[in-house]
Image (cartoon, rainbow, N blue to C red):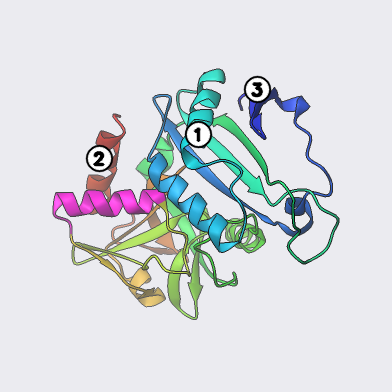
Amino acid sequence: MGDIYLFDGRFLPKEEVNISPEDRGYYYGDGIYDVFRVYGGRLFEPELHFRRLERTAAGLRLQMPIESGPLQTKLEELIARNRLTEGTLYVQITRGTSPRSLPLPQGVAPVLVAYTTEFPRPVAAMEAGIRAKTVEDIRWLHCDYKTLNLLPNVLAKQEALDAGADDAILHRSGLVTECCASNIMIVQNGSLVTHPANNLILHGVTRAVILRLAQAAGIPAEERPFSLEELHEAEEAFITGTTVEVTPIVAVDGRPIGGGSAGPVTRRLQQLFANLIGQ
């Protein structure tokens, strides 16, 4: 992790960053966040990330403490100060410090914290694939907002780990939504199928990039809900996300997907993504 943090517009050593116990992010999870990927010392797809951050802030009636343009400049300086070449950059904005009370406080300044972390590409997982367990999706109905309220995701992930799997695939009454911290796609008859970007899933940046790459490469794609049965019978399945890139799912609920290894569509998309990031 980088030694320098961005805290309310100032660059400070980590030990000098002080968050009040009356911060509403601590009381209520009243805040938002985003995780940017950094390749070659540069933010990956910053416009999509900032668009999502602004949309989430508007949905929560939370004031952005700084506009996206100046914030991007600050984040790029943070990357440079920490000499980060490959990794992630985490940004969190809470509503601010206020005595504990449910109504939205007036005249309170939002609190912004950002830091960097060295994080290599997940080469081993992308090559070998992961095993997943299906878990009922018990989250609220605004999963498109990237908020701090992640306890259902935490519990689903732990349930999968306890069962010997690597990740959880969430579903609502048998219709697959996404995973704990990533989106999911399956391949049917050579075509991609993924849940539409509505209120039931996070509008993943990597998800959008993969759909864009697929369209350019002539790979058909359909955005619609698909069932657990379709998942189990899929030719291929993979997750997409900032830290996982394009990682194949080789088994679900103890049953192999396709041939039990990454399929040709997944491999092609992995290569197209690697070309995009210059790897």
Residue nearer the viewer, 196 or 180: 196
In the rendering, at what x and y percent does residue 163 appear?
Answer: 59, 61
Query: In this picture, which residue range is highlighted in magenta?
Result: 205-219
| In the displayed structure image, the side of residue 238 where residue 119 appears, left or right | right
Kind of residue at disc 1: Pro
Q: Which of the 4 image quadrants contains residue 115?
A: top right
Q: Residue furthest left?
A: 218
Kind of residue at disc 3: Asp
Using the numbered discs, state the Cα–Cα distance from disc 3 to disc 1 in whole angstroms: 22 Å
Q: Which residue is at a point 29% across and 58% down the rendered structure image?
A: 259
Kindly identify which residue carries mark 3.
3
Image position of 74 with respect to 58: above or below: above
Q: Which mark is residue 70?
A: 1
| In the displayed structure image, the side of residue 213 where residue 245 appears, left or right | right
| In the displayed structure image, the side of residue 78 where residue 96 appears, left or right | right
Q: Residue furthest front?
A: 107
Element marked by disc 3: loop
Q: Which mark is residue 271?
A: 2
Using the numbered discs, state the Cα–Cα distance from disc 3 to disc 2 in whole angstroms: 33 Å
For marks 3 and 1, the one nearer the N-term is: 3
Residue nearer the viewer, 255 or 239: 239
Residue 119 in sight here: no
Instruction: Give the label, 3 or 2, closer to the camera.
Output: 3
Residue nearer the viewer, 71 or 265: 71
